[in-house]
Amino acid sequence: MSSAVDLRTPVSLLPLTLEDVVFDAGSRRILHGITLTIDAGPRTMIVGPNGAGKSVLLRLCHGLLTPTAGRVRWNSPEVPHGPWRQAMVFQRPVMLRRSALANVIYALKCSGVLAAWRRERALVALERVGLGALADRSARVLSGGEQQRLALARAWAIDPEVLFLDEPTASLDPGATQEIERAIVAMHASGTKIVMVTHNLGQARRLGDEILFMHQGRIVERAPAESFFREPRSREAAQFLEGELPW
């Protein structure tokens, strides 16, 4: 019996494969031959000392940077860099000079969502991150934690298959951090793959299913979160966890 393929269903973006990726900034080499496969499912936390290349790696995955050498390849044959397939939230999100609701509606417009559906989807996204009551408030007067939740709402509204996060709670207080973490957990539960850079090892423990440890532009260790924190395999990871490597 022959089987039919539903052509309306997009091919999954994942796995994402990096093949011997090198990245140079001027005369300085940031990444040294990274080979990596990122699959659907587990929440991936990227940790390591300052200057390890974590944020550069994330931007290469998202498509904001182009490798000096090597290749970044998605599973899908379609162009993957449209915001309807994957999204990224930065440490300091840029807010448009309009309301919180209008910020989310604009993201949906850029993603090609029909105008008739945008407002409802935007309101749902704001409610998901606890900003429903602030929908009409100017985004630029929101607190830092509220702005970061708004950035997550913009991403969540477009229902991306993959979400990259670059230290989304780095400058936030514990309460705001807890709200962001709650939203990230909920996004993962809804089916979005989470790939996140964090300096907060407690956060990596709470949110991570697997850990990528980077040092000096290389991936030194990849392991399930529990085993990484209990018994790291590499000397560099052990030193990092003991606070013996500079941050």
Image: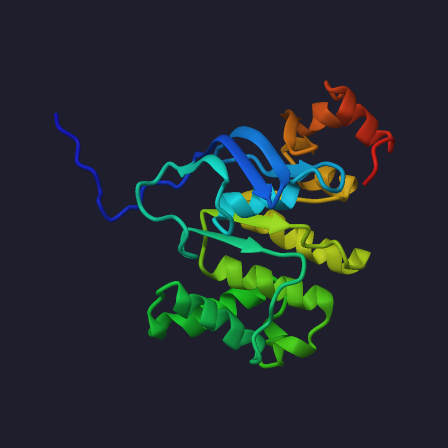
Q: Nearer the viewer, residue 1 or 45?
A: 45
6 on left or right of 113:
left
Q: Nearer the viewer, residue 216 or 190?
A: 216
The C terminus - image quarter: top right
- The residue depicted at 69 percent of the width and 74 percent of the height is 142
- The residue depicted at 57 percent of the width and 75 percent of the height is 100
Can residue 13 be seen here? The reply is: yes
**Relative to 79, residue 246 above or below:** above
**Relative to 13, residue 180 above or below:** below
Can residue 195 be seen here? The reply is: no
223 on left or right of 84:
right
The spot of residue 160 in percent (x, y) is 45, 52
The spot of residue 95 in percent (x, y) is 60, 71
The spot of residue 212 in percent (x, y) is 64, 32
232 on left or right of 54:
right
The N terminus - image quarter: top left
* Image quadrant in which you'd find residue 159: bottom left
- Count of labels shown? 0
The spot of residue 150 in percent (x, y) is 60, 66
**Relative to 93, residue 73 above or below:** above
- Extreme left residue here? 1
- The residue depicted at 59 percent of the width and 56 percent of the height is 89
Q: What colour scheme governs how the chains and residues are painted in the rendered image of this protein?
A: rainbow
Q: Nearer the viewer, residue 62 or 84?
A: 62
- The residue depicted at 72 percent of the width and 25 percent of the height is 228
